[in-house]
Structure formats: C-alpha cells, structure tokens
Amino acid sequence: MLTVTDTEKTLTRRVDKRSLFKLVGYDVLQVIARMGCIFFFGVRCFGRQHVPKIGGGLVCSNHQSNLDPILVGLMPNRRMNYLARRTLYKFKPLIWLMDFLDAIPIEREGMGIAGIKETLRRLKRGELVAMYPEGTRTHDGEIGPFKPGFITLARRARVPLIPVGFDGAFAAWPRGQRMFKPTRISIVWGKPLLPEKYEGMTDDELLAELERRIRACFEFARRHRNRN
C-alpha cells in the first residue's frame, strides 16, 4: 500500500501511463456510482452538454457533503481528477481508493507546492480537475465565501472554469452525520468560463463571476429539487 511519501514520489510516473486496470476500473466505478446515486438519491443532472469533450478544465462546485466528489464525477464521460487532503491518507481503504483514482495529495490549509505543480501538470495535459472554491463543506446547506486559490491555477494553465451547482447532498449527508440517508439530489452544469473571457478580469472580478455562475447552477438545482 502506498504511503503519502510514496504517492508523491510516483505520482507523475503513474499518471503518465495509467494501467488498463485503472482505465477500465474507473469506467466501471463510474457506472456503479451512477446506478447507486439514481437508486438512493433519484439524481437528476442538467447541462451535461457544457462539459468540454477534450482539453483541460477546472471543475468548480459548491461543497455540501462527503458525497460531492462522487456527484461531480458522476455524469461526464471523462475521467475526473480529485484533490485529497493528506489527513485522509491514514485510512487504509481510502489510501487504496485515492491511489486507484490517482488523487492529488494536498495540505489541509492549502494545496502546497507539490499539489499545485501536479494539478497544473494534469490541466496542461488536457485533464479535468475537480475542486471546491469554498474550501470546506457547508454548515447549513448554503454556499459559503469563496477562496481565490483556483485563480492562480486557472491563469497559469489557461483552462476553462466549469461551474457546477447541486442541492440535496447536504440533506443526505450533513456534517456530523455518520452515514448518508436517501433523499433527492439535483446537479446542474453551467457554461464554462473560457480563458479568453476571464484573462481581462481582475482577480476580484474573476472570483465574483465564478461565484455568480455556481450560485446560478445551485439555485436552478434547488428549484428543481423542491418541485419534485
């Protein structure tokens, strides 16, 4: 089993040449996750057409629960890359899963130099990376203040920022609850914010624009969930 140190040393080599087992296994896990989420949560997804078919992209979503990585990677017919806090690497089942998914280890209070470099590398090689601008799970189901960490990654990699908003995950698995419970979840993908659009923005303008787009997706998801 890989330790954190081993992961950092071999991350680049493993991702450069993923095994057939990992490639096929990811697709199998994605199908299982889709079926499970539809069965348990009646998941409805809107805006899948906004996911770029090729090229790198930062997938930025609100953060409601521990289900969020599954929800974000559920519908795109592409592999998603995930960021994983170092503190998670002390649980053996999670170590295996994060190794299998080629997760990028990051520091609890920030990405750290190694995390930034590896994230940029994957973006520049044309992969999708998921992250949460809020930085932590919500305490009340609403969207919290955004942190600007994604801005440096976006500007250096020059990739689209793809907004995602979902609702229902907090009701299914809020902070402090040991296990999830079945409840409806709606997911909305918004139109990407392209580099040529945001390169003329200040950092404050970019932060505000991404937040506006994620909130619009979130509000659409909430309205749909409340109607059903």
Image (cartoon, rainbow, N blue to C red):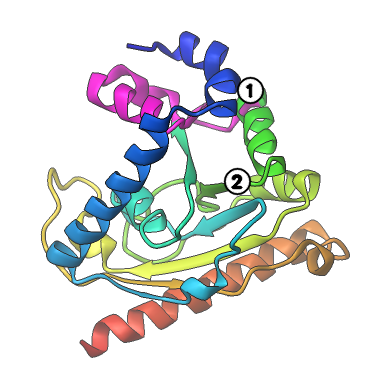
Task: Please state, as top left, top right, bottom left or bottom right, where the C terminus lies in the image.
Answer: bottom left
Q: Position of residue 129 (x, y in %)?
A: 55, 46
- Residue at screen point 20% across, 60% down: 35
Residue 207 figure quarter: bottom right
Identify residue type, mark 1: Ala
Find residue 114 and name its label.
Answer: 1
On screen, residue 187 above or below 95? below
Closer-to-camera residue (139/126): 126
Q: Give the mark count.
A: 2
Question: Which residue is at 58% across, 19% downward?
Answer: 13
Question: Which residue is at a point 47% across and 72% down the rendered structure image?
Answer: 48
The stretch in magenta equals 85-112
In the image, 51 versus 134, the foreground residue is 51
Q: Is residue 41 above or below residue 81?
A: below
- Across and down, in percent, residue 90 comes to 31, 17
Q: Report the amino acid beneath label 2.
A: Glu
Q: Residue 182: name its quadrant.
A: bottom left
Classify 51 as above or below 132.
below
Residue at 79% over, 61% down = 195
* SS assignment at label 1: helix
Report which residue position mark 2 lands on.
127
Whether residue 129 is visible here, answered yes or no, is yes
Nearer the viewer's eye, disc 2 or disc 1? 2
Is residue 90 covered in magenta?
A: yes
On screen, residue 53 versus residue 1, left or right, reads: right
Residue 97, horizontal then vertical, whole percent: 31, 30
- Residue 178 rendering spot, x and y as whole percentages: 13, 43
Residue lying farthest to the right in this orientation: 200
